[in-house]
Image: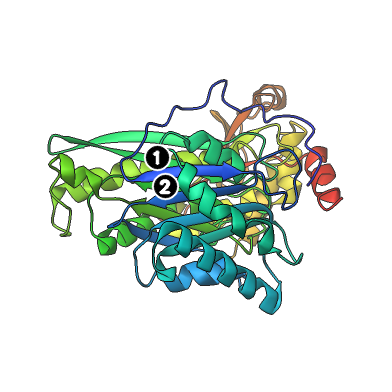
Amino acid sequence: MGKITAVSPFAPQALAKLPAIDGVRFATAEAGIRYQNRTDLMVAVMEPGTVVAGVLTQSKTCSAPVLRCRENLTHGKARILVVNSGNANAFTGMKGREAVDATVASAAAAAGCKPAEVYVSSTGVIGEPMDAGKFTHLLGGLVKKTKANAFEAAARAIMTTDTYPKVVTRKVDLDGVKVTINGMCKGAGMIAPDMATMLSYIFTDTAISQKLLQALVSEHVETTFNCMTIDGDTSTSDTCLVFATGKAAEKGQEPITRKTDKRLAIFGAALHDVMRDLAIQIAKDGEGLSKFVTFEITGAESFKAARTIARACGNSPILKTAIAGEDPNWGRVVMAVGKSGEAADRDKLTIWFGPHCVARNGERSEEYDEKTVAQYMKGREIVIRADVGVGQASATVWTCDLTHDYVSINADYRS
């Protein structure tokens, strides 16, 4: 894949230790799909009774695995997940569908389940034919070797140009019963949310109906993964799946089956926190980044309008390169707000770089000091806020700067 010049400066010194979740086990393998001497295949096996909810890319050129997940999500049950890295199995025509069919058949046989309970994902190069024969014969053995405490290994197996595995865990109390939510994801380039935008898998032992779980995932994705961008490019393979084994019921947790259940909001808040954490981790591992950037838009007509404006800022190459160069060029923020297509009052537009107001009510602020703001731009984490002066709504989008390394990584991606 692309040449990675360095590990992200935001890579954690130590990865979160994810506890085992009752009802799910993992295994990985080196299948040689594209990489040598590294794992590139992961399976997660769930016990009977597991429900699944998900959101998938809205790309009109989505991959064959995405189409199969979309079809199987209508059933809402899951027993096994198979993910490969190195080949996206996208834009591969009938051969791509045949590769998915072969994977699903082998996985269903290995897990002893129905094909509708198999979920598949692929990530990597687009347009290269997928040879499922490189790994379908491994699935039976992998299922037998699965372990409950192999979250980190699973997260590493799904990486492409990521510089570190992205994992997170949360615990929440539901009427005296502790439930766990663990998440993993991959993504570093070709990232622009049109849900989903990356590969993300979340597992919990919570007992909850599939319908309510799907409602939570669909709602929370709008303020988490769909508020994160690296380069403005939506992938063909984006997938976010949340699996709930329901095993906490065996510890006394009454299943959550009604919208009016107060525990739904408690669990939902924890799930949102996991999704938000993963989205930020992706933005902090953007290809070639040197800075993590947060755009906060206030004073907009609606949340969607504010998010669109924030995305216009987060996807602007000319603004992102200025940030990489530590240039407090707030004029490029003015440009991005104006091009977004959403309502904004030019003569009320006010912009802050960190705590420093650089523009107020449509012109440079009187207190603006170039040296002071330039010094702020030398920090690794940058916050840029703009009030567009037309309403009360707000949104936050996470992104990164655009450096020479991003160009190098993607210029060499297929070599």
Determine which residue is flagged by label 2: 202
Q: Is residue 247 left or right of residue 61?
A: left
Amino acid type for the residue under numbered disc 2: Ile
Q: Residue at x 67, y 35 (%)?
A: 163
Say whether residue 347 is visible.
no
Image-based side of 103 in relation to 216, left or right: right
Q: Which mark is residue 140?
A: none
Query: The disc labelled 1 sits on which kind of residue?
Result: Asn
Left or right: 227 with respect to 48? right
Q: Earlier in the sequence, mark 1 or mark 2?
A: 1
Q: Position of residue 261 (x, y in %)?
A: 13, 53
Closest to the observer: 404 or 344? Answer: 404
**How much space separates mark 1 and mark 2, taking CA atoms?**
6 Å
Q: Residues within 10 Å of mark 2 (few under 14, many from 20)?
A: many
**Pick the front one: 65 or 49:** 49
Q: Position of residue 116 (x, y in %)?
A: 41, 70
Q: Is residue 91 among the parts visible in the rendering?
A: yes
Q: Which mark is residue 182?
A: 1
Where disc 2 sits, the SS reads: strand
Q: Nearer the viewer, residue 87 or 312?
A: 87
Q: Are marks 1 and 2 in contact (CB under 8 Å)?
A: yes
**In the image, residue 305 lies at what x, y percent?**
48, 60
Query: In percent of the image, x 66 and y 71: which residue is there?
Result: 96
